[in-house]
Image (cartoon, coloured by chain):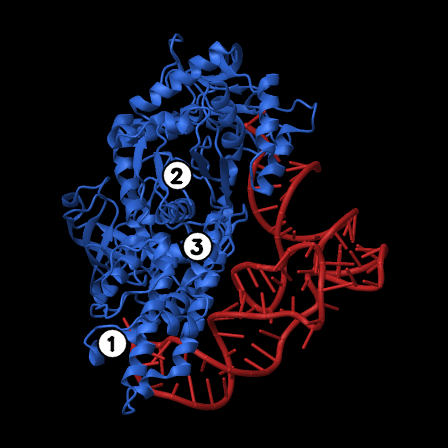
Amino acid sequence: MSPRKILVTSALPYANGAIHLGHLVEYIQTDIWTRFQKMRGHECWYVCADDTHGTPIMLRAEKEGITPEQLIARVHGEHSRDFSGFYVQFDNYHSTHSDETRFYAEDIYSKLKAAGLIEVRSIEQFYDPVKQMFLPDRFIKGECPKCGAKDQYGDSCEACGAAYAPTDLKDPVSAISGAKPELKSSDHYFFKLSDPRCQTFLREWTRQGSLQTEAANKLHEWLGDEGENKLTDWDISRDAPYFGFEIPGAPGKYFYVWLDAPIGYMGSFKNFCAKKGLNFDDYWKPDSKAELYHFIGKDILYFHALFWPAELKHAGYRTPTNVFAHGFLTVDGAKMSKSRGTFITAESYLTQGLNPEWLRYYFAAKLNGTMEDLDLNLDDFVSRVNSDLVGKYINIASRAAGFIAKRFDGKLVTEHLTEKFDAALPDLREVASEIAEYYEQRDFARAMRRVMALADQINQYVDQNKPWELAKQAGQDAKLHDVCSILINAFRILTVCLKPVLPKLAQRAEEFLNVAPLHWADAAHLLPPAHAINAYEHLMTRIEGKQIEALLAANRESLAAVPPAPTSDPQSPQRHAQHQQNAEDKMQSTNPISIDDFMKVDLRIARIANAEHVEGAEKLLKLTLDLGPLGTRQVFAGIKSAYDPATLVGRFTVMVANLAPRKMKFGMSEGMVLAASDPEGKTGGLYILSPDAGATPGMQVK
RNA sequence: GGUGAUGUAGCUCAGUCGGUUAGAGCAUCGGAUUCAUAAUCCGGGGGUCGGUGGUUCAAGUCCACCCAUCACCA
């Protein structure tokens, strides 16, 4: 097998929000696949970048009183931290706000223009006279023209599902300034996707290769039958003010963020080539023999399977070998929800001390390479990880290691074991090639099932041979040594098969086994005779239900007590290279609860006895609360941005007194103070509550 | 509304080209075991394969319609 050249991307996360478990499905999936390809000895590069342009970035930076550059630099740091925390190993993680991306955006644009595929048209759009900018559809609100529902966005109605143009809204207002928008015309630049050349090319491109069948169906839906012309031109420009790249020769016009997002793949790779001394053209010239794959969410298939190949083709670059779309993440069968605590950020998962490889394994055990949604069932997560990883796989090493260490001085048998091994565990040395095929197809679930079936088989072997009995019988040392040596070798082979999913665990297993980093081919042979292994230290702990509860509690509280690091706005005004998946159901705040539910919350008047800054915390203040007869409590509250500790001391406020104590990075938090804020973060500000005069510490609030 | 997908055991999922008695893991129940951080092994119970109708010698699998869930409609 000759080495392949493979370039892999994940969708670019938008630099406007925190990475959450939904994002991680994609990055973990891609990471597993690229690690697998590398283990196979292929030249495989995994690049990604932050998607940094567009109106939401501009407005958020403005709201925070910083420049867009400062905002995207900060988020780049947060994203990088989260990814490395989950062992997502990019070869390069760049930014679309880069010279390289600008270069290729301008290059592609000018080539498309030269090919006659760019057209300028004047369009009428709503304009905010106060803010002095054109308004994206999602920044316009008004009354639905169809059902009359109030406060609907400019593109579709959440109440009746109708889709319409913003100009159809009754009584439209700007969501930014509240002003009444005016219609104003402006020149926009369009990519002529409706051009027969694009149609013809896309029909051909979508038919060739091996697109997922669901994706092919979807594309056919968009393309229509032969002869139909269903594709319309794509508006690739936006008017100033806009954070992005100005279009060459068009002052005041900027490339729409979605134009430069996929180009960011090229930008990141170009940046990497410079560092690594690789030849960019080997991967991107039209006749390149390298393979190019994009892992994406199913919601952005349109951009990656229509616009993107059409752009590349007509700008003289190679087109993607394939696009791998996956479904969305649900948690316990429902969309992720902040009120249920299932909108779980990557950061909170790590901060709560959960092992990232638990999640990597669980996702792997569920990913099958289709566009179906993937459910994180929390009970199943716990039992699956504990049973499969700890009970079956890790247990094999644990069962054999003690005997090897105590009885055989840490060394395996001195003869070649191959025959005995093959007799004991037939096919185990060949199985890696079968499992490789499942990885290649991205059917990780199947690969994991196969590996766990092997683990079952190995554990059966242990029970059949009963090393603990051999150990007690005189003259059975050689047999005991054989059995345990076979087990260590079997464990090593399973480790090879699991390494793409569990890189950190595999690394620790390699240390235990005293071997160089394992490659895929290592699964075909055994350890050398008399190989010495190191002392066994337990490789993975079990998940406890309590940890999951704490994780949910942490994410549930974060809505009020600790404003989350800027999360993606569920009602994002536009879609980005990274899908805005799993927007929480927005009706939940109005879901009625019973009086009994409410009475479960023990609200008390508290006097702020002390307030101080917390070393190293961006958002937290440490409060000591006096509850009168109920004693004092220590609470960490995410109100640093709004309050100076000195002004808080002596104030009375309201706290939740029966909240389960939560271990935070800086200590235990034994409750939560109540504060008002806009849950969508559109308007800033944080306001703690105060009782009227006369209330005393410890009084119940109901 | 249109389009596409999904629906199999309490839970999570396999099920190839239509072909024996529909499988696995987890959970549960019974037994064994004690090397392993209670992990492991053997066995049992548990199913109208969403529903109805059709094609066929034979349907979880193919077709039609219906129901439910999800997504997309740039």
Q: Is residue A320 above or below residue A453?
A: above
Q: Kindly report which numbered mark, 2 or 1, lies closer to the viewer in this rendering.
A: 1
Please, is residue B70 above or below residue A461 in the view? above
Shown in blue, the chain is A
- Residue A553 in view, yes or no: no
Q: Chain of mark 3?
A: A
Answer yes or no: do the residues labelled 2 and 1 have beta carbons within 8 Å?
Answer: no
Position of A65 with respect to A237 (left or right) is left
**Picture residue at 27% right of the left edge, 74% below the top:** A413
- Looking at the rendered structure, whether the residues under marks 3 and 2 are on a common chain is answered as yes
Q: Nearer the viewer, residue A293 or A492?
A: A492
Q: Which chain is red?
A: B
Local packing at callout 2 (Cα closer than 10 Å; few below 14, some 14-19, many 20+) is many
Q: Are marks 3 and 2 in contact (CB under 8 Å)?
A: no
Which of labels 3 and 2 is toward the front?
Answer: 3
Q: Residue at x 40, y 42 (%)?
A: A2
Q: Which residue is mark 2?
A: A568
Disc on the earlier residue, 3 or 2:
3
The quadrant in which the N terminus of chain A is found is top left
Are both tags, 3 and 1, on one chain?
A: yes
Which residue in the protein does label 3 denote?
Answer: A364
Residue labelled with disc 1: A404
- CA distance for labels 2 and 1: 52 Å
Residue A60 point in image, percent of width and height: 33, 30
Residue A83 visible in this rendered orientation of the protein: yes
Location of residue A169 in the rendering, given as x and y in whole percent from the top left corner: 57, 25
Q: Under tag 1, what secondary structure?
A: helix
Give, as a three-letter code, the residue at label 2: Ser
Tell me: residue A140, above or below residue A489.
above
Give the percent coordinates (x, y) of residue A700.
Answer: 32, 61
Which of the image's four quarters has the C terminus of chain A? bottom left
Three-letter code for the amino acid on which mark 3 is drawn: Ala
